[in-house]
Image (cartoon, rainbow, N blue to C red):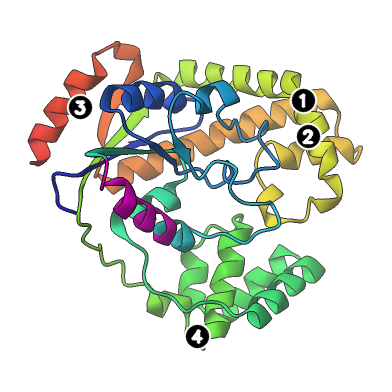
């Protein structure tokens, strides 16, 4: 590979319009699409993750959509390894490959790399997850604070998966997780063009509301019912399912569940936008301005060559 091969990264908040534009890009460059969505990888939960429809999937070759089960463990590090191996093959036949999604850690893993961490043994993983399922998230936070107070102070305490994984690493390596995090950016043997989509906030929030209503109409409740007894799985600990599980448990009514999904999705969208802005690596494309994306893209490429 060489740097004439280009990975186009199309990022942005949920419901901004990545799927539609990604299909246009795939057609324009005759390139495949790699999904960087940490929930669309699960084959069982298509509605609540807004996975591409069968008709959309038929328009371009997609990778990493529905290729894992909700029972499988899958991390950003594994996504990095899988994607780099796939890109090596794809660039033999394509000058451009598109990666699109809103999962910040997945995108960052491919673009900048993840620090090398020990492989977690089955014994450690099983013990940590059993502890989490028995005693809950607060117990794991207390454990992380004792093992690695530095990472504990930095971590999102609501992100159970990250907290559990940090505890796993501390136990496997017998070192604080923070001591293994160098933050060093890895060189890639291909060019990366990072683009982040945005819209006016009111329009983005309205699109989120419409999407939630559509999910419920499309059968989100019925989909969630199938996995209600598995709601403890980390793969189901996500916006959309958590609220519907509360409804199915009789804790809230459907109207309140819908309101909470919309609110929590708006919060997540704001978090995504803030994260991409902080990276200062993205070229921003405002979909409200109705500009020619490909003219914008060509001009963007010129600035990084």
Asked if disc 1 and disc 2 are in contact, CB closer than 8 Å, the reply is yes
Could you tell me which secondary element the residue under label 1 belongs to? Answer: loop
Nearer the N terminus, badge 3 or badge 4?
4
Task: Please report the residue visible at 70 percent of the width from the left and 48 percent of the height from the top.
Answer: 236
Reading the image, the residue beneath label 1 is 219
Position of the N terminus, as image quadrant, is bottom left
CA gap, disc 1 and disc 4: 44 Å
Asked if disc 1 and disc 4 are in contact, CB closer than 8 Å, the reply is no
CA gap, disc 1 and disc 2: 6 Å
Image mark for residue 223: 2
Q: In screen coordinates, is 117 left or right of 225?
A: left
Nearer the camera: disc 2 or disc 4: 2
Q: Check disc 1: other Cα within 10 Å, few if <14, some if 14-19, many if 20+.
A: few
In the figure, 276 relative to 213: above or below? below
Reading the image, the residue beneath label 4 is 173
The single residue placed furthest to the top in the displayed view is 290
Q: Quadrant of residue 199?
A: top left
Could you tell me which secondary element the residue under label 2 belongs to? Answer: helix
Reading the image, the residue beneath label 3 is 297
Q: Check disc 3: other Cα within 10 Å, few if <14, some if 14-19, many if 20+.
A: some
Q: Main secondary structure of the magenta part?
A: helix
């Amino acid at each position: 590979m060489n740097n004439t091969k280009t990975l186009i990264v199309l990022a942005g908040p949920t419901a901004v319009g990545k799927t539609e534009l990604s299909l246009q890009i795939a057609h324009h460059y005759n390139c495949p699409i790699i999904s960087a969505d940490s929930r669309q990888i699960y084959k069982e939960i298509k509605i609540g993750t807004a996975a591409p429809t069968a008709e959309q999937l038929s328009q371009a070759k997609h990778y990493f959509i529905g290729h894992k089960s909700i029972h499988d463990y899958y991390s950003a590090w594994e996504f990095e390894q899988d994607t780099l191996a796939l890109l090596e093959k794809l660039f033999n036949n394509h000058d451009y490959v598109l990666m699109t999604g809103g999962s910040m850690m997945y995108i960052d893993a491919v673009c900048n790399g993840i620090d090398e961490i020990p492989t977690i043994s089955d014994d450690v993983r099983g013990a940590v997850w059993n502890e989490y399922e028995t005693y809950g998230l607060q117990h794991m936070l207390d454990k992380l604070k004792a093992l690695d107070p530095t990472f504990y102070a930095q971590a999102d305490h609501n992100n159970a998966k990250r907290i559990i994984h940090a505890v796993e690493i501390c136990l496997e390596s017998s070192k604080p997780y923070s001591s293994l995090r160098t933050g060093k950016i890895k060189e890639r043997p291909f060019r990366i063009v990072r683009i982040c989509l945005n819209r006016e906030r009111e329009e983005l929030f309205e699109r989120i509301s419409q999407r939630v209503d559509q999910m419920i109409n499309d059968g989100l409740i019925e989909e969630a019912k199938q996995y209600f007894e598995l709601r403890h799985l980390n793969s189901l600990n996500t916006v959309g399912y958590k609220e519907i599980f509360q409804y199915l448990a009789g804790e809230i009514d459907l109207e309140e569940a819908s309101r909470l999904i919309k609110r929590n999705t708006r919060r997540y969208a704001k978090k995504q936008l803030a994260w991409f802005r902080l990276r200062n690596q993205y070229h921003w494309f405002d979909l409200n301005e109705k500009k020619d994306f490909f003219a914008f893209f060509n001009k963007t490429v010129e600035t990084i060559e």
